[in-house]
Image (cartoon, rainbow, N blue to C red):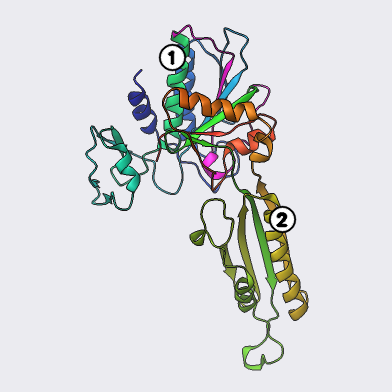
C-alpha cells in the first residue's frame, strides 16, 4: 500500500483520547484503529498479539540474521486538545512556498510558520482547519507499517523487528500496560517527532506540585486580626515563585508553571508543574517551592501543605551509556542523505518510560509538524 494512502486511511479514524479517564484505552475508537493494524500485520504474515483489553498491538518480524533486535513504537490516539472527528485532509502537491488558506478561513502563514519554506516543491498534507490532522502520531504508524512491508518484501539482513502501537500517549498513560515480555528488543525508537532527521534522546525531568492552603475564616465585618484569606496567601505564594515561565524559556531551560488555582477564602489549591533537563536543577526547583512553603507557614502558622509527584525523568541518563545507539543512528541518517537534527524534547515521551524499563528508546522525527 502507498504510504500516503496508509496515512489517509488511519487519520480517517477518530482516535481522540479522553483525559478524564485513567486506564487503557480511554476511548473506544482507538480499538477501531488497532483492529485495522492487526489485520494489516496479519496480511503481511507478521506475528501479531493484540491485547484487546488494554488496546496494545504487538508485532514481530522474525530476523534473518544475527543482528540485534530493534523496536519501533507509535501511539494510536490523538490529542483531546482539538477534534479528531471527520478529518478532511487537504493534499498540496508541489508546494509553492506561499501562505496556505484553510477551508475554515484560517491561514497557515509563512511568516508565522517559517518552516514551511523548507518544504517548497514537496507534497504537504494539511487539515481543513476544523480538526486536528492526526499526524501525531498516525504519520509514525504509517511509516512503521511501510517499513515492515519493505522488509517483508526484501532480502535485506535484519534482526528481529518488534513493533508496538500503544493507546493514550497524549494523556500520559501510553505505557501503563505495556508488556515487556512481548516487546523486548535490544533497543527501540518512538517514531513520534516532527521534522525529518529529528533525533531526540533528551527530555525534561517532570513533576507536579500540589499546594493546599487552609485559611482562617471570619465574619468579614469583624475580621481584623482573625481572617487569613486563603486566596490572598495563594497569590502571595505565587509572587515568590521565580519568573521562569514556559513563555520565557527555550532549549534546555527549565520552568515553573502555575497550572491551576482554585478555591475561596477558606481553602485554596495551587498546582504547579516543574520541568528541567538537569536532575540537580529539578531537585532545586522542588527546594525553592518547599522554602516558600516554610516561609509562609512561619508567617501564618502552618496553614500550607505541599506534596510533590514525579511524573517522568530525562531518558538521557540511560541512553548516554548507549554510545553505539547514538552514533549508529546519526551515521545511518547521514548515509542516506538526511541531515541529523539532534534536539531535546521540551516535554515527555513514551520512550522515557520504556528506557526506564531497560529498553533504550530515543525518538525519531515522523514529519508531523
Question: Split into 4 quadrants, where in the image is the C terminus?
Answer: top left
- Crowding at dot 1, Cα within 10 Å, few <14 / some 14-19 / many 20+, comes out as few
Q: Quadrant of residue 294?
A: bottom right
Residue 233 percent across, percent down from the top left: 65, 77
Q: Is residue 155 magenta?
A: yes
Lateral position of residue 195 relative to residue 128, left or right: right
Q: What SS does tag 1 mark? A: helix
Marks 1 and 2, the one that precedes in the sequence: 1
Q: Which residue is mark 2?
A: 283
Residue 145 percent across, percent down from the top left: 45, 21
Lateral position of residue 16 relative to residue 101, left or right: right
Q: Is residue 119 magenta?
A: no
Residue 38 percent across, percent down from the top left: 49, 20
Q: Residue at x 52, y 51 (%)?
A: 251
Q: CA distance from mark 1 to mark 2?
A: 46 Å
- Residue 150 image label: 1
Rendered view: 307 above or below 213: above
**What residue range appears in magenta?**
154-182
Q: Main secondary structure of the magenta part?
A: loop
Amino acid at each position: 500500500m502507498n504510504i500516503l494512502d496508509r496515512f489517509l486511511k488511519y487519520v480517517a479514524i477518530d482516535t481522540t483520547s479522553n483525559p478524564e479517564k485513567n486506564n487503557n484505552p480511554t476511548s473506544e475508537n482507538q480499538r477501531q484503529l488497532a483492529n485495522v493494524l492487526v489485520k494489516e500485520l496479519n496480511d503481511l504474515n507478521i506475528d501479531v498479539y493484540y491485547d484487546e483489553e488494554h488496546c496494545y498491538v504487538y508485532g514481530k518480524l522474525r530476523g534473518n540474521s544475527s543482528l540485534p533486535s530493534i523496536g519501533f513504537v507509535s501511539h494510536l490516539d490523538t490529542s483531546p486538545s482539538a477534534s479528531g472527528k471527520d478529518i478532511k485532509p487537504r493534499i498540496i502537491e508541489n508546494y509553492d512556498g506561499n501562505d496556505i488558506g484553510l477551508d475554515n478561513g484560517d491561514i497557515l502563514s509563512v511568516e508565522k510558520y517559517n518552516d514551511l519554506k523548507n518544504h517548497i516543491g514537496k507534497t504537504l498534507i494539511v487539515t481543513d482547519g476544523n480538526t486536528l490532522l492526526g499526524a501525531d502520531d498516525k504519520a509514525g504508524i504509517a511509516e512503521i507499517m511501510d517499513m515492515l512491508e519493505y522488509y517483508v518484501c526484501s532480502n535485506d539482513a535484519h534482526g528481529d523487528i518488534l513493533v508496538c502501537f500503544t493507546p493514550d500517549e497524549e494523556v500520559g498513560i501510553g505505557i501503563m500496560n505495556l508488556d515487556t515480555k512481548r516487546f523486548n528488543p535490544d533497543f527501540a525508537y518512538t517514531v513520534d517527532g516532527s521534522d525529518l532527521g529529528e533525533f531526540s534522546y533528551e527530555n525534561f525531568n517532570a513533576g507536579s506540585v500540589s499546594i493546599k492552603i487552609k485559611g482562617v475564616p471570619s465574619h468579614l465585618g469583624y475580621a481584623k486580626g482573625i481572617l487569613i484569606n486563603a486566596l490572598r496567601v495563594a497569590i502571595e505564594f505565587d509572587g515568590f515563585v521565580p519568573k521562569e515561565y514556559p513563555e520565557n524559556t527555550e532549549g534546555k531551560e527549565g520552568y515553573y508553571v502555575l497550572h491551576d488555582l482554585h478555591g475561596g477564602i477558606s481553602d485554596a489549591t495551587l498546582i504547579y508543574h516543574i520541568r528541567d533537563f538537569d536532575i540537580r536543577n529539578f531537585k532545586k526547583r522542588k527546594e525553592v517551592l518547599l522554602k516558600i512553603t516554610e516561609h509562609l507557614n512561619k508567617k501564618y502558622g502552618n496553614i500550607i501543605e505541599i506534596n510533590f509527584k514525579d511524573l517522568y525523568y530525562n531518558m538521557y541518563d540511560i541512553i548516554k551509556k548507549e554510545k553505539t545507539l547514538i552514533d549508529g543512528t546519526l551515521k545511518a541518517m547521514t548515509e542516506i542523505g538526511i541531515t541529523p537534527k539532534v534536539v531535546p524534547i521540551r516535554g515527555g515521551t513514551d520512550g522515557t518510560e520504556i528506557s526506564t524499563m531497560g529498553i533504550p528508546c530515543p525518538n525519531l522525527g515522523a514529519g508531523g509538524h
